[in-house]
Image (cartoon, rainbow, N blue to C red):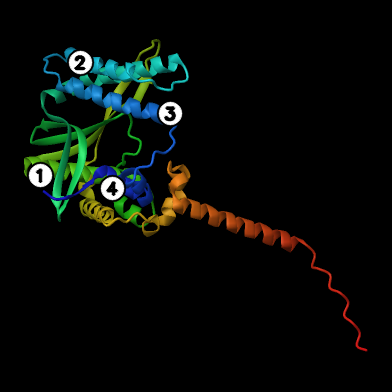
């Protein structure tokens, strides 16, 4: 087995900014967090673990599967102390997440569970002495193939099938959406990992399943209706297979070579799009350098403007030749 292991999470962080990758994975820094971030992370993890508990339950009815998921949900939700502003907000959020779990496991989720092969597992493959890995929440057997999935509350940050040149546009600097490109990298690793596990002949797929993205209130009641949304990125990956595979290999090699200087990787795009909301600003030397350079330029420009507004200094009268 290859000694060098690179994960999809590491590649995505490196795409966002090599320095951010360093702070997240090589020498972890704990950035300041907001209450909204804590709530979102807890919601995502509670949703994921509850569904996995329901999928694993050896039962025949979908109702029993939902009950098993609810038991796990109650354990996770009640053991946490989340910074909600009001009790009503917490109660509403709890009801929404539980309703989404029920909606999924009562329908397509129950069928998925009947074809379940693994949950909360890692897929990977080896190439050129590097092992590539990604975690997936579940693997299902399908007709003529296999499906690996990750459960998410919404599809923010997941690439949309709007272009056949996502990677090329990203590498050329025409577009800068590293998280979306990261989902293509994860898809590549998951699909190739499935092939490594089950063989080349089956139809191997990877998809994100969103449970909270498409929701709407039911008119005249307090109920909320959910439509489970699947985003199967397999076709998007295959449309740009060479470009995605090359990008994954390129960033893996950069990670293993210790390349954490953002100036060597789309620095203009990073400073224009990532720095302003990066949680590691207070630890980033490039951010301080760019801020200082901007301040110096602004100060210099301001002083130049002020001096240009002043009348020229009066010169003393020239002495007459005697």
Secondary-structure class at tag 2: helix
Residue placed under numbered mark 4 in the picture: 11
Give the camera-side residue of 95 and 161.
Answer: 95
* SS at circle 4: helix
Which of these two is toward me, 190 or 258?
258
Q: Quadrant of residue 142?
A: top left
Write the residue at 20% across / 15% down: 68
Instruction: Tell me where residue 126 appears, x and y as whole percent.
Output: 13, 50
Q: CA distance from mark 1 to mark 3?
A: 39 Å
Which dot marks residue 163? none
Q: Residue at image x 54%, y 57%?
A: 293
Of labels 4 and 1, earlier in sequence is: 4
**Residue 36: image tag:** 3
Residue 48: x %, y % from top left: 26, 26
**Residue 239 point in image, percent of width and height:** 22, 49
Q: CA distance from mark 3 to mark 2?
A: 28 Å
Nearer-N-terminus badge (2/1)? 2
- Asked which quadrant contains residue 56, the reply is top left
**Residue 113 position (above or below residue 25):** above
Label whose residue precedes the other's in the sequence (3 or 2): 3
Q: Residue drawn at (15%, 35%), measured in percent from left and top? A: 147
Tag 2 residue = 68
């Amino acid at each position: 087995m290859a000694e060098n292991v690179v994960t999809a999470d590491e590649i995505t962080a490196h795409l966002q900014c090599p320095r951010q990758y360093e702070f997240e994975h090589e020498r972890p820094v704990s950035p300041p967090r907001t209450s909204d971030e804590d709530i979102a992370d807890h919601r995502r993890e509670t949703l994921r673990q509850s569904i996995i508990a329901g999928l694993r339950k050896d039962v025949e009815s979908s109702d029993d599967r939902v009950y098993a998921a609810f038991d796990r949900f109650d354990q996770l939700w009640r053991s946490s102390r989340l910074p909600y502003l009001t009790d009503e907000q917490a109660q509403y959020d709890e009801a929404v997440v539980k309703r989404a779990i029920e909606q999924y496991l009562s329908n397509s989720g129950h069928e998925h569970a009947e074809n379940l092969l693994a949950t909360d597992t890692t897929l990977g493959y080896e190439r050129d002495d590097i092992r590539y890995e990604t975690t997936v929440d579940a693997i299902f057997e399908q007709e003529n193939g296999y499906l690996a999935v990750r459960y998410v509350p919404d599809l923010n940050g997941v690439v949309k099938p709007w272009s056949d040149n996502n990677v090329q546009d990203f590498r050329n600097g025409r577009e800068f959406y590293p998280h979306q490109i990261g989902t293509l990298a994860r898809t590549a690793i998951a699909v190739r990992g499935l092939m490594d596990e089950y063989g080349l002949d089956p139809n191997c797929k990877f998809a994100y399943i969103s449970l909270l993205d498409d929701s709407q209130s039911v008119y005249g009641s307090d109920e909320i209706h959910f439509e489970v949304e699947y985003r199967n990125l397999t076709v998007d990956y295959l449309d740009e297979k060479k470009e995605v595979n090359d990008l994954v290999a390129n960033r893996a090699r950069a990670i293993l070579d210790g390349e954490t200087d953002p100036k060597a990787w789309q620095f203009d795009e990073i400073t224009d799009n990532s720095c302003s909301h990066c949680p590691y600003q207070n630890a980033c030397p490039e951010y301080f350098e760019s801020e200082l350079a901007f301040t110096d330029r602004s100060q210099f420009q301001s002083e130049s403007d002020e001096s240009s507004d002043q009348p020229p200094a009066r010169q003393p009268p020239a002495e007459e030749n005697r």
